[in-house]
């Protein structure tokens, strides 16, 4: 895989969609961030947490494998740090993330974003119009 080209494409898509994007120099393990994401969802703050992790990783280039970075994000979105630390310490959401990984593996998902409707897939960041046509073409009704 041509990483520099892939990153350039992602940066362009982010710019086209007016999304923040930084110049990340390293890739960090997101496993604990994912487990805390599952925990944050049970607290009703999954979207806020995921947004904070996205910004920390893709915009600010922070190492989301580090517990102190994750605890800062937990605090930022107003979640209890002591409960988050306990969820990580006990790996309470490990099985849930494992289950998600097994599902995407079984579905043949190899990159993000991937959109799936029935047995059809749209892989990669695409313009709104392409996603709209994919959904409409697969029977998803407009609201």
Image: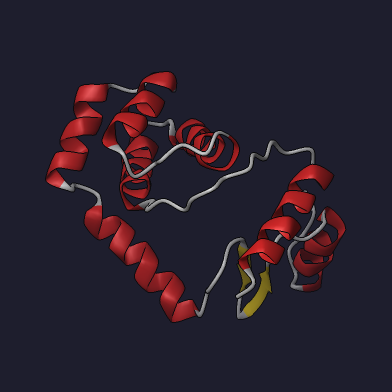
Does residue 64 sit above or below 135 in this rendering?
A: above
Q: Is residue 128 left or right of residue 94?
A: right
In the image, 135 versus 82, the foreground residue is 82
Q: Where the N terminus falls, by quadrant?
A: bottom right
The mark total stands at 0
Does residue 129 sit above or below 78 in this rendering?
A: below
From this viewpoint, which residue is outermost toward the left?
Answer: 90
Quarter occupied by residue 87 = top left
Quarter occupied by residue 36 = top left
Does residue 35 sit above or below 103 in this rendering?
A: above
Residue 140 image position (x, y, % from top left)? 73, 63
Q: Is residue 101 left or right of residue 51?
A: left
In the image, 36 versus 44, the foreground residue is 36
Q: Residue at x 34, y 45 (%)?
A: 65
The figure's colour scheme reads secondary structure
Does residue 136 sit above or below 82 in this rendering?
A: below
In the image, 34 versus 41, the foreground residue is 34
In the image, 85 versus 119, the foreground residue is 85
Q: Residue at x 43, y 31 (%)?
A: 45
Q: Is residue 110 left or right of residue 72?
A: right
Q: Is residue 12 left or right of residue 115?
A: right
Residue 115 image position (x, y, % from top left)? 63, 65
Residue 63 image position (x, y, % from top left)? 41, 40
Q: Residue at x 67, y 57 (%)?
A: 7
Residue 75 image position (x, y, % from top left)? 36, 20
């Amino acid at each position: 895989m041509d990483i520099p080209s892939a990153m350039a494409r992602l940066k362009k898509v982010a710019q086209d969609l007016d999304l923040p994007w930084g110049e990340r120099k390293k890739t960090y393990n997101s496993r604990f961030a994912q487990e805390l994401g599952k925990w944050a969802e049970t607290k009703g703050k999954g979207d806020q947490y995921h947004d904070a992790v996205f910004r920390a990783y893709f915009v600010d280039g922070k190492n989301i494998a580090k517990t102190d970075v994750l605890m800062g994000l937990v605090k930022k979105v107003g979640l209890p740090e002591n409960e988050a630390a306990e969820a990580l310490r006990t790996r309470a959401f490990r099985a849930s993330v494992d289950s998600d990984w097994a599902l995407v593996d079984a579905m043949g998902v190899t990159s993000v974003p991937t959109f799936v409707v029935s047995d059809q897939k749209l892989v990669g960041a695409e313009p709104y119009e392409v996603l709209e046509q994919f959904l409409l073409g697969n029977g998803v009704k407009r609201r």
